[in-house]
Image (cartoon, rainbow, N blue to C red):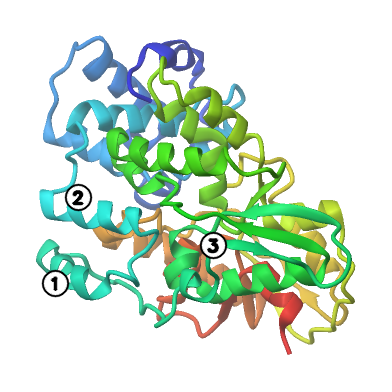
Amino acid sequence: MRDFESYKDFMEKCSHCSYCEATCPVYLEDLLETHVARARMELIRAVLVDEEMPVTDRFKEIIDRCLLCTNCRQTCPVNVPVEEIVIAARNKLYKGKRMGMIKRKLLKQIMENRGISGAMGKLSSIAKVAGVKNIPDIPSKSFDDQYEAGTYPPEGEVRAKVVYYAGCATNTMFPETGDIVMKVLKKNGIEVVIPEGLSCCGIPAISEGDLNTASEMIKRNIEVLSKTDTDIIITDCTSCGMTFKEKVVNSLDVDDEFKEKAIAVSMKFREITEYLMDIGLTEKIKPVKEKVTYHVPCHRGWSETVSDAPRKLMEMIPDLTVVEMEHPEKCCGAGGAFFMENKELSEGIRSKKTGEIKQTGASILITQCPSCRSYIGNSSDNDLKIMHPLNLLLLK
């Protein structure tokens, strides 16, 4: 993602089939042809590769108004990595300085601390100066406060051993999800290792095109995770999983010494519900008398089964009524921090999603993505209970 050389062949593979029109949330909201993936790539080629056109404010706006949701890539018949091409464009345009200095400082500290709870007092004033709004309420205790680094034995016989990578959002915004992950794993005979010294997966910086900052986080994580003696690393967040599976290696320089380690670590990553459906549950599942619908996260393409794993889990729960949305895989409009910079656009995308959720009549929405969970939950259009799929196993 540091240059366009590796993407030239991909750009030429685009046949202008228009399939991306059907899945791009930005295009479906504003109906501007320039916001379709094929148009973005043509502009990137003309402006940044062939340099036939100048860099203008409108060009920057087109590059910035991409959610990086990967839906166009998942629809593309030849799997053109459009989101990586957009990231490469941001890297070339802004050199890691798309945000102002204060916001960059805030973001880096959040990433280094894997969230903001531990540094909330210090960072809140910076956030206000930077104009960051819609920061969700932060629980008083983070996941790190509840579970120190170490090895946690299971209840009963050891069936397997995994490393648990809890991302920024789980660590500080939704620590109860991390607690549930730990409890479910231990109840099902799985020993859990929590390494010391982890940082953010790097996706916020990658999204900004700030590959140098992303590289710092990536190398720290790879160094820690490569020293663990387990074959499986699990995460409860699909965006963290996608980052380690698909983005980490491509974010490093071609000759970077960490590439080999990064590839080895990326091969070990699994999403938690996918992993549990493969290994099987030993703990008896309690009935749940609720009506549930499933919002499928955009960042699902790194695994063939991660979309269906929560559905398989729900099929195993007695008395649970599952109602599918008309378009369960459509984006909610959050896009990490995208909604902060594109309020009206994001809210329009979200309103379509919340409308579909309402039509199901469900009382619970499940999703693995904490960004979706937070953004949909902040909508005034619903009074849903929104939770990670594993929550269903511990509902009373």
Give the x, y percent position of residue 64: 27, 41
Q: CA distance from mark 1 to mark 2?
A: 14 Å
Farthest residue, direction bottom: 396
Mark 3 lies on residue? 149
Q: Amino acid at mark 2?
A: Arg
Q: Tell me if label 1 and label 2 are in contact, CB under 8 Å.
A: no
Mark 2 lies on residue? 104
Q: Is residue 65 above or below residue 316?
A: above
Q: Secondary structure at mark 2?
A: helix
Q: Of the residues tagged 1 and 3, which is closer to the observer?
A: 3
Which of disc 3 and disc 2 is earlier in sequence? 2
Q: Amino acid at mark 1?
A: Ser
Name the residue rendered at 53%, 31% in the picture. 262
Name the residue rendered at 23%, 25% in the picture. 92
The answer to whether 183 appears left or right of 329 in the picture is right
Is residue 230 at least partly visible in the picture? yes
Q: Tell me if label 1 and label 3 are in contact, CB under 8 Å.
A: no
Res. 125 mark: 1
Q: Nearer the viewer, residue 325 or 90?
A: 90
Q: Tell me if label 2 and label 3 are in contact, CB under 8 Å.
A: no
